[in-house]
Amino acid sequence: VQLQASGGGLVQAGGSLRLSCAASGASSEINVMNWYRQAPGKQRQLVASMTWGNSMHYASFVKGRFTISRDNAKKTVYLQMNSLTSEDTAVYYCNAFGVLGQGTLVTVSS
C-alpha cells in the first residue's frame, strides 16, 4: 500500500486548506487513518484520527477547526483545515494500513 498526501501549500492566517490522502494498492477502503504533523524543530503530533465505525477524534488544538472525511470509492481521506494560524505550519502526514505517507507541507503566513 502507498499513501499519497497532497493539498498543502501557502495560505494566509484565517484561511483554509483541504489535504487529501489517497491509498493505492489497498484491497479495502480506509477505515482507520491518522493525520500527524511535524513543525520544524518539534516532535510529531497526532492531529486527528478516523477509527472504525467512522468515529473521528481531534487533538484539542485543532478541534472545531479541522474535519476528517472520506470518499470510499476513491479510497481517499480528507482533512479540511479552517481558521488556520501560523501554529499550524508543519508537514502533515497521513498514516493508514501501517504505512506513513510522504507528507505535504502547510505554511500559514501571519
Image (cartoon, grey):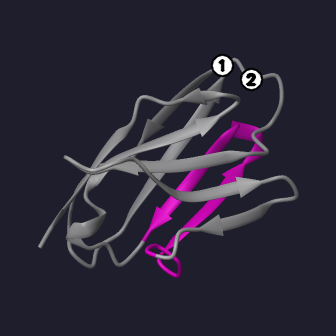
- Whether pointer 1 and pointer 2 mark residues with C-beta atoms closer than 8 Å, the reply is yes
84 on left or right of 71: left
Q: Amino acid at mark 1?
A: Val
Q: Earlier in the sequence, mark 1 or mark 2?
A: 1
Q: Quadrant of residue 85?
A: bottom left
Where in the figure is residue 9, as x and y percent of width and height?
25, 50
Q: Residue at x 31, y 72 (%)?
A: 84
Question: Regarding mark 1 in the picture, which secondary structure is present there?
Answer: loop
Magenta part of the protein: which range?
A: 61-81
The residue at which mark 1 appears reads as: 1
Where in the figure is residue 53, as x and y percent of width and height?
88, 58
Q: Residues within 10 Å of mark 1 (few under 14, many from 20)?
A: few
**Quadrant (top left/top right/bottom left/bottom right) for the C terminus:** bottom left
Q: Amino acid at mark 2?
A: Ala
Residue 42 is tagged as none
Where in the figure is residue 38, as x and y percent of width and height?
34, 47
Q: Residue at x 57, y 53 (%)?
A: 78
Position above or below: 55 against 26 = below
**Quadrant (top left/top right/bottom left/bottom right) for the N terminus:** top right
Would residue 11 be counted in the magenta stretch? no
Residue 26 is tagged as 2
Where in the figure is residue 94, as x and y percent of width and height?
53, 41
Question: Regarding mark 2 in the picture, which secondary structure is present there?
Answer: loop
Would residue 76 be counted in the magenta stretch? yes
